[in-house]
Amino acid sequence: MSSVQRVVVDGSIIATRNLIKLKRVPEVLVFVLISPIMFVLLFAYVFGGAIDPGAGISYREFLIGGIFAQTVVFGATFTGAGLAEDMQKGIIDRFRSLPMSRSAVLVGRTGSDVVYNLLSIVIMSGTGLLVGWRITSNVPDALAAYALLLLFAYAFSWIMAYVGLMVPSVEVINNASFVVIFPLTFVSNAFVPVESFPTALRHFVEWNPVSSVTQAVRELFGNVNPAAPVPDVWSLQNPVLYTLIWIAVILVVFVPLSVRRFKATSR
Amino acid sequence: MATPPQPLEVEPVLTPDDATPDPMIRARGLRKSYGDVRALDGLDLDVPRGTVLGLLGPNGAGKTTCVRILATLLVPDEGTVDVAGIDVIARPDAVRARMGLSGQYAAVDEYLTGFENLVMVGRLYGFDRRRARARAKELLERFSLADAGDRPARTYSGGMRRRLDLAGALVAEPDVLVLDEPTTGLDPRSRNQMWAVIRELVAGGATLLLTTQYLEEADLLADQIVVIDRGRAIAKGTADDLKRQIGGERVEVVVADPSALEAVREVLEQVTGGEVVVDGETRTLTAPAVAGPQTLMEVLRRLDTEAIVLDDVGLRRPTLDDVFLELTGHGAEDTVADETNQDGS
Ligand SMILES: Nc1ncnc2c1ncn2[C@@H]1O[C@H](COP(=O)(O)OP(=O)(O)OP(=O)(O)O)[C@@H](O)[C@H]1O
Ligand SMILES: [Mg+2]
């Protein structure tokens, strides 16, 4: 077997093992999947009245794209926590003593979390439809939006995988990740339009990848008014391309970094 | 700290340079420190093919550190290790393919069933699905886990977990096995089962390194014993060599009244002619039972004539503690005390 084949095969064995755990302890999923529902309801009914997205669309239509982006970013914490837990369990010694691929534990973890992200996106879509969100574009565009979200989620999983390998215990991971995740998601166009930020923050918002992925899915789902102007920055004018670049950069940086870190802790 | 004693080379001598016939495990000058704690301090080991080496030592002696280095989980600061002629540090994967490890704490996945655990291990060894399943079934049978095979491992008792872990080490039928305290925490019945399994593996031609805190266990299972203390070998040889070294069985007397300690000490000295160890706190005296039961009877006759009241009396086999007392002049538990002193810097 070539080493690439080995990574894929061993990674899928580990992913299967992670999914068996999800099946045995579904409680783990409940709270994580409830949180996006809570966010939709909170923003749609509590803050919704106070925020005017402008550009001739309703806030709920505007909101769902942002919640999608926020959900997948928050969901990456799941990867970090899962990995941090794995590293403390006895089973990791078994993995280390086997002639398996050294990156399989990471590839398997980020891989099984795609299933988790898929689940949360389905739940999100359902909740969105209930509060009045609609896809007004076409099927290929909508599928492209979902694919982009999953890719973005996958890349973010690798960031959190790295964080999960750095923290000394599972408890630390939530705090550690919120320090990164809260500013990224709230200082973006996910919940309020770019124009509402003061100039000092505006640049960050405009180049924040959470903004571009939000903009991209809004456009692909047809949740924007075609007549309304998009902020005049390259990142938001070309949100799909800009997001894809971020995905590539994150993977190129964090995959080798995490694999190296894993090897260092295992020997 | 007093300079550690040089290894007492008990016959047959196993010096590092002699040509051990066909060594399966060969370690030279292993050193490993954790901060200021020297876990291994120049350890040499030789395990000839098809034999069992018992690594005997108290808490903190460095047993687990040694096992983790052999099993490629840890890189030593200094020293070399070969397993079946393969350099463990340079080619860990080649070693992993041939060696089975059962660590001090069971390395099983709690949420997977026993069967799923073993299938996963088989698949990670590169078995196809069918072969992994067949092997898992076979091992569950062999370790009397067939009935529990479909339950998540977190519902297993300590002994069952331990057996499942050992089964995991055997999936690929390795010819070298490293077991870290395989019977610690097991009840007598599980311990006997574990011993039977280990004997079976040895009969099948496997080479084994096992660690233990019990001289009795090393005696039962090992061809050669290496006693380690503070990361160094302090004695090497067969169980008989070690016992001869420390005088075999001992008479142990517990007096009812501490004032009788001196009188009993004199009796023991006269009867055995050996060194008498007195522990005032527990009112216990021990001395080598040179003639076994005869020594005990003679001691009893003498104590009876002197009308000394006893709480307890008997013959007992030497323990790790006796070995330590004899070899290092300090009891086994002192190492632990030392270890805590070293902490925190
Ligand atoms: N990860 C670690 N960090 C710091 N010190 C360690 C670490 N692992 C082991 N040590 C220290 O190294 C020494 C040897 O430990 P080791 O676990 O090898 O002993 P052991 O013989 O296996 O003991 P036990 O019988 O308790 O399992 C001890 O003093 C221990 O405190
Ligand atoms: Mg240990």
Image (tube, helix red, strand yellow):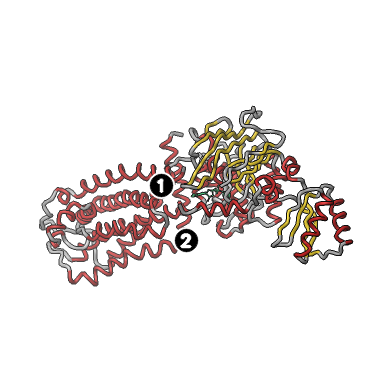
Q: Which of B193 and A225 is in front in this view?
A: B193
Residue B138: percent from the left, percent from the top? Answer: 63, 46
Height in image: B301 above or below B96?
A: below
Residue A62: percent from the left, percent from the top? Answer: 20, 62
Residue A210: percent from the left, percent from the top? Answer: 24, 54
- Label 1 element class: helix
Q: Which residue is drawn at 30% across and 42% down?
A: A252
State whether residue A160 appears in this view: yes
The residue tagged 2 is: A25
Q: Distance between the residues labelled 1 and 2?
A: 21 Å
Numbered circle sitting on residue A49: none
Q: Which of A50 and B293 is in front in this view?
A: B293
Q: Nearer the viewer, residue A246 or A94?
A: A94
Height in image: A133 above or below A146?
A: below
- Direction top: furthest residue: B19
Disc 1 chain ID: A
Closer to viewer: mark 1 or mark 2: 1
- Circle 2 packing at 10 Å, graded few (<14), some (14-19), many (20+), is few
- Label 2 element class: loop
Mark 2: amino acid? Val
Q: Residue at x 81, y 64 (%)?
A: B310
Disc 2 chain ID: A
Q: Residue at x 87, y 58 (%)?
A: B302
Mark 1: amino acid? Leu
The residue tagged 1 is: A106
